[in-house]
Image (cartoon, rainbow, N blue to C red):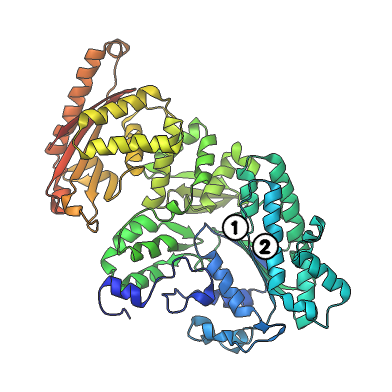
Amino acid sequence: MPVNGTLNDKIRQTPLPLGIDIFANIGNCYYTDKTLLVKDIIDSGIQTILFTRPRRFGKTLAMTMLQSYFEIPTDKGQLSEEDTSKYFRHLKIWQQGEKYTSEQGKYPVIMLSFKGIKGSSFESSLKDLRHLISSEYGRHEYLLSSSKLNNADKSFFSGIYSKKADDSDYHSALLELSKFLYKHHGQKAIVLIDEYDKPIQTAWESHDDDFYDKMIVFMRALMVNVLKTNPYLHKGILTGITRVSKESIFSGLNNIIVDTILDNRYSEYFGFTQQETDEMLSFYGMDDKKAEVAEWYNGYVFGNTEIYNPWSLLKYVESEGLALPYWVNTSDNKLVGDVLENIGNEDAEILKDFISGGTITQSIDTNIIYPELEYNGEAAYSLLLQSGYLKCVGKTISEGNILCTLKIPNREVQRIYLKEIVNRFLRTDMPRAVNAANSFSTAMLTRNAAEMQKTLQKLLLSTCSYFDLTEEKDYQNFMLGLLAASIYGYDIKGNREAGHGRTDIMMRPKTNTKNARNLPGIIIEIKHCEATEQEKSDPKLMDKILEKAATEALDQIDQMSYASELQSAGCDKIMKYGAAFSGKRAKVLFRT
């Protein structure tokens, strides 16, 4: 039941678990109960499983929850007085019966998270990996005084713990640690590895083939030793964004089961389902925000389950209902940028349709070979899908191939593509692109149509277009990109139904923005002018043609009553712009 008082009061009394990825630290925070993942893992009988999901969809919290559930609480090697079942007695897993509660606190656990491995070279990344493995040995330091380990065991343990072991010893470090734990506790170990693919992605993003090849060799040895034919392993559970191809890291690991976003069994455990989202919004008294939340943060489909982005939803509630691209702002989106950098003209046309809500049916391979991303469109689309930048809205199996109908998930992710298009369009770095976008937006908000036109004209003349500008929607997408890169406090929509038709760009002030009443509503109508070669050669004639088209765009705004929606929303001031384009020429006119 929601607590009484304002939304701020509710959030103070039941805080949101933003930034908390250690399950035991949830405390009195709002928690969406995902503990039945424990039940499904116990019931499955699978020894080793990899969950691939986009970043910030709850993978780390799930892994620390599993650690808290299964791990034997120890204090210097002896059973600890702490009863870790206290974290679960009020949750769903505890209602499932003795079969499951008897597994709580039963196993030694090895827990590693590779999310912080971001070295710029193999040597620096290996140093980080050595430190990480040494820290996990340190967590089990009590083994050095165990009477059940022999001198050779303790010597190996000391070498890893002190970081003085040879590099080759780290290949078997996790295997050996599971053996030591088994000797001491008499129970096989559970191995949890979070974000296992981060070191490989970092190596690929470096564009250093030697770095990538060495990282693949190291990670393959580490994984195969601990997860394949390990007699001391009870279960191995991994998370990551992708499955790195069998031919590289998982060579020889034919026992691993991979659960991707296309699979059904565990689909509800990462991200928020519709029911969970509705419950959270109701708890905080935000039932009236469901439509906006769905538009911005829904749209993911894991298996057959509709999923919301959990990070963005939490940030949205914390900000008391301010819709912004929270998830996309937690990363530099280098992944999308690098993929877009390598797409060809055919894929560029597809991308334009994506931004307008279109789809493509594409063969998807859930095994990623990173080097292929530079030339293999199937690999690129597969990575964008698994990383959360596309969603699958339809799936068929044809001759052993998975065919997915792909689409941009929601408005939040659409903002990434628009920004990246601006960046690629200018063929320059993002700071310069954003500066140009800021100039455009400032001119628009100050009713300076001439400056808007000047900025557009300068961009069109001085840069080489990433997409050929051949039709109206090309210019519309580019202008949407400029706005997405520079302006907040507005709901910005393209092809919005209004009055008696659809307006090209409508900008409505967000009602929860502090100065919303002082912000104008803005409508931009766009025209594309076809011109003969003779007309193109006459600047004065082209100016007249464009001015006539821009005037027609303004007239259309009035004749079709596009402003009616903004007026109904309480906008006291409305600004109207007509923009006309032909090739790399632009004309912008203003009307109140």
In this orientation, which residue lies closer to the viewer: 354 or 79? 79
Which disc number belongs to residue 116? 1
| Pointer 2 or 1: first along the chain | 1
Label 2 crowd (10 A; few <14 / some 14-19 / many >=20): some
Residue at image location 87% in from the left, 77% down from the top:
150
Compared to residue 222, the image places residue 281 above or below, namely below
Which disc number belongs to residue 249? none
Q: In which quarter of the image is the N terminus?
A: bottom left
Helix, strand, or loop for circle 2? helix
Verify CB contact (< 8 Å) between mark 2 and mark 1. yes
Q: Is residue 362 visible in the rendered structure shown here?
A: no
Compared to residue 161, the image places residue 211 above or below, namely above
Which disc number belongs to residue 132? 2
Residue at image location 43% in from the left, 52% down from the top:
329
Q: Where is residue 453 in the image (x, y as percent from the top left)?
A: 26, 28
* Three-letter amino acid code of the residue under disc 2: Leu
Compared to residue 272, the image places residue 120 above or below, namely above
* Three-letter amino acid code of the residue under disc 1: Gly
Is 536 left, or right, of 334 in this rendering? left
Instruction: Give the quarter of the image for residue 134.
Output: bottom right
In this orientation, which residue lies closer to the viewer: 524 or 440? 440
Q: Position of residue 256 (x, y in %)?
A: 69, 63
In this orientation, which residue lies closer to the viewer: 146 or 579? 146
Compared to residue 245, the image places residue 456 above or below, namely above
